[in-house]
Amino acid sequence: MGSEFPTIPLGQLCDPDRGITYGIVKVGEFVPEGIPIIRGGDIRNGRIEIDHAKRVSQEVSEQFRRTVLKGGEIVMNLIAEAGHAAIVPRDFAGFNVSRDVAVIPLNDAVNHRFVEHVLKSPQHISWLASRLQGSVTQKINLSTLRESPIPIPPRQIQDWIADVLGALDAKSELNRRMNQTLQEMAHAVFRSWFVNFDPIRAKAEGCQPLGMDAATAALFPDSFQDSQLGKIPKGWQVRSLDAVAHFLNGLALQKYPPNGNDCLPVIKIAQLHKGGTVGADQAAADLPPDYVVHDGDVLFSWSGSLEVVIWCGGRGALNQHLFKVTSPDYPKWFYYFWIREHLPEFQAIASGKATTMGHIQRHHLSEAKVLVPPTELVSAMDKVFSPTVEAMVGNNLQCRSLAAIRDALLPKLISGEIRVKDVVHIATESGS
């Protein structure tokens, strides 16, 4: 990252009494009332999302007092993927971290948000990735991390850069929270209609179903019928999950090595978790078209940590262990929410496998049953669900654009190619 400002090793920017170090080597048994710990996989997209069930005893945490958090430090995942970093919220004070997490306790002479942006930048990620070590599991050594070159402008410029880039991150975070709300609302409506049968029960009792117009309510039946699943709404059908959607398994893409400039990033389970393809392997672009993934496609990982997402990480190549799910007959929301409904069941099957990587098989898709209303009712439901899914996709695509702007701005601001005051002025003038 070219810079008009001096470059200082990251280790010299830290609190000298603490320094950069890693966390608890052996966490032992988790205890219900213990100390929450942050693990490497908890740090994603500039956020820390911990599993509060993962707690260690006070005694174990005390053995690693050097990494007991105060809030305000930067934490970084050391294993496998470079660049996953986040600032520790103040309400995480007292938490600890695992062996695969580095704690970076910056001193107060630097703006912590500014340094965090540098650590997450594509340029710095590339610098770290070229220095990963280990034959089986690659990792960032602490000595490498301490030597990381950090361009340091005057404090006022650090503050300005942090504010400008922070505004972009704040908008992305707002979109993320909005999508979380939209998803929860849509899933609640789906379960109300397809699992709890609230509109049918209301009509059976002579009441008007809540939250819908009269025309839509008229399409719901007012009674039930027997089925292999028990009582279901009259006129609805029971079908298998793989009968309402096509599950296309990805390719062994090592057989399609990149063959020039026209390549595609390989979308694996790791990319599914990250929601993007930064640092992904590359494959030849001349794949069969069905194996090319586009924004808005439904992807379902059937092994490892089972997950279903509506992909918004850009065009890519579908790797094995992932299904691309499509249907010529039913809208996207229909099979997406039905997969989500069966996901806990699939995850339980996978976790019960006596292998290193649990998975489900094709017959599990056939055994998973879904309810299919008449075509007219599905069309009416589509007017409720499709706009929600489209809004979620739109928000995620905007987040990707904001991240691209942020990543492009940082090196230009640091190099002096773009002056911070000019960006602040433009933002002020535009009312941003």
Image (cartoon, rainbow, N blue to C red):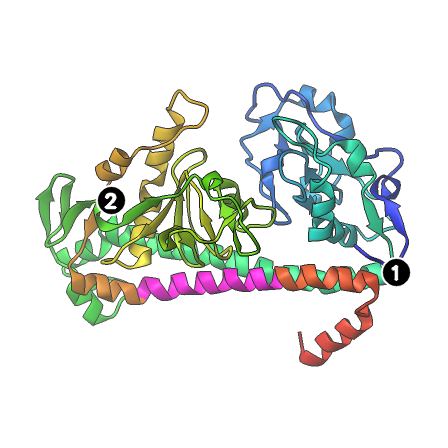
In the image, residue 121 lies at what x, y percent? Answer: 71, 52
**Magenta residues, as a range?**
384-402
| Distance of label 1 from label 2 (alpha carbons) | 58 Å
* Amino acid type shown at disc 2: Asp
Residue 387 on the magenta segment: yes
| Residue for badge 1 | 4
Query: What residue do we see at 81% from left, 72% from top?
Result: 421
Question: Is residue 282 something one can see in this rendering?
Answer: yes
- Quadrant in which the C terminus is drawn: bottom right
Between residues 163 and 100, which one lies in front from this camera angle? 100
| Residue for badge 2 | 242
SS under mark 1: loop
* Amino acid type shown at disc 1: Glu
Dot 1, crowdedness within 10 Å: few (<14), some or many (≥20)? few
Residue 373, relative to residue 368: is it above or below? below
Predominant SS of the magenta segment: helix
